[in-house]
Image (tube, rainbow, N blue to C red):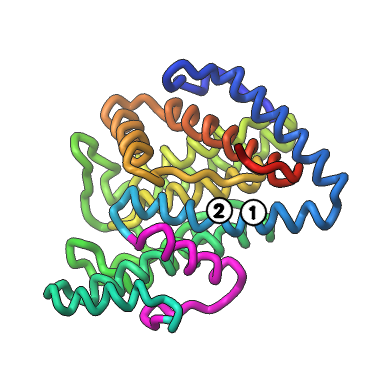
């Protein structure tokens, strides 16, 4: 890994250069430990990742005020990431809390469909991440428009937009309407296909450059394409979750980790403020890169402790 500190806009008193060095140093230690432990270490890392993906899904949903609580999200995600089939509308016998929410919804006149929708938002999100990881990381496929469209289709299957657009009319399709958020006006729908082609082509150029120079900063790369994607806002709904799916697929492939954003109110507000400033002031992805880097260092530390057999203090 190699860093250009100019690609970061520091948060608080963080020094991107120092944080990047910490990330690189800990990453090297993790690789050494993996070599020492062999298949046992690999299995431990795989299990740690699988368990953490539930938090990633929860945080990304929480940013959008979607999905279920962390406990319920983790239960569903662990099953999905271990290869089990999860029916979004069927309540397993053990999920008494979910069943209780349905009963409460009926008595409080809250539509039961809202509770079922929340469950489906978790299931589809997890399935979309599972698909993207399998394609980009496991099968080593390049990021492509078709891959993005297919991932979005999985993410939004059977979920109509809050504005009432049926999922069959927008899922896995570029938008045909104008969209904005606050003072940020996103790309006109007529230019979305061309902008997406540009985004994918630029990503390919960045990867070719890495393959020829062996120099890559995965944190700025992930931030760049997360930010560029959301500035295009190619879909009628699901753009925020999609940009974070792409971000984590890039991180997992080139840095060996995923990071959780928006997992609590403070984290959610920080992320939203960063994205808002990026859109309104056209400041690029520097702040997001700094946030991803800081969270990556924390994640590396946790993994190092796990693989070293040390308990977190």
Q: Nearer the viewer, residue 105 or 295?
A: 105
Residue drawn at (72%, 37%), measured in percent from left and top? 211
Residue drawn at (74%, 45%), measured in percent from left and top? 309
Look at mark 2 in the image and give the residue it sits on. 52
- For disc 2, the neighbor class at 10 Å (few under 14, some 14 to 19, many from 20) is some
Residue 8 picture location, percent across and down: 49, 22
Magenta residue check for 87: yes
Determine the image quadrant of residue 311. top right
Tags 2 and 1 touching, CB below 8 Å: yes
Residue 77 picture location, percent across and down: 50, 65
Residue 157 picture location, percent across and down: 38, 71
Q: Nearer the viewer, residue 286 or 113?
A: 113
Look at mark 1 in the image and give the residue it sits on. 48
Residue drawn at (24%, 71%), measured in percent from left and top? 114
Residue drawn at (28%, 51%), measured in percent from left and top? 189
- For disc 1, the neighbor class at 10 Å (few under 14, some 14 to 19, many from 20) is some
């Amino acid at each position: 890994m190699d860093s250009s500190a100019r690609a970061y806009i520091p948060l608080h008193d963080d020094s991107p250069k120092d944080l990047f060095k910490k990330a690189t140093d800990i990453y090297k230690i993790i690789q050494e430990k993996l070599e020492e432990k062999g298949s046992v270490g690999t299995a431990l890392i795989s299990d740690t990742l699988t368990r953490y993906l539930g938090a990633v899904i929860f945080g990304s949903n929480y940013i959008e005020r979607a999905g279920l609580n962390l406990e319920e999200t983790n239960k569903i995600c662990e099953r999905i990431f271990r290869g089990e089939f999860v029916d979004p509308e069927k309540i397993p016998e053990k999920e008494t809390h979910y069943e209780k929410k349905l009963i409460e919804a009926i008595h409080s006149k809250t539509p039961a469909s809202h509770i079922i929708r929340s469950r489906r938002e978790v299931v589809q999100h997890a399935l979309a991440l599972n698909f993207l990881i399998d394609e980009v990381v496991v099968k080593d496929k390049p990021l492509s428009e078709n891959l993005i469209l297919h991932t979005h289709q999985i993410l939004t299957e059977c979920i109509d937009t809050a504005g009432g657009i049926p999922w069959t009319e927008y899922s896995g399709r570029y938008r045909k309407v104008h969209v904005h958020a606050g003072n940020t006006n996103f790309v006109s729908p007529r230019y979305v296909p061309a902008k997406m082609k540009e985004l994918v082509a630029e990503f390919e150029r960045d990867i070719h450059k890495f393959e020829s120079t062996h120099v890559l900063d995965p944190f700025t790369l992930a931030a760049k394409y997360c930010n560029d994607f959301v500035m295009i806002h190619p879909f009628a709904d699901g753009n925020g979750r999609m940009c974070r799916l792409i971000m984590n697929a890039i991180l997992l492939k080139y840095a060996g980790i995923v990071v959780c954003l928006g997992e609590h109110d403070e984290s959610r507000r920080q992320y939203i403020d960063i994205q808002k400033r990026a859109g309104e002031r056209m400041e690029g992805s520097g702040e997001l890169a700094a946030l991803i880097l800081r969270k990556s260092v924390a994640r590396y530390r946790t993994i190092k402790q796990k693989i070293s057999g040390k308990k977190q203090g």
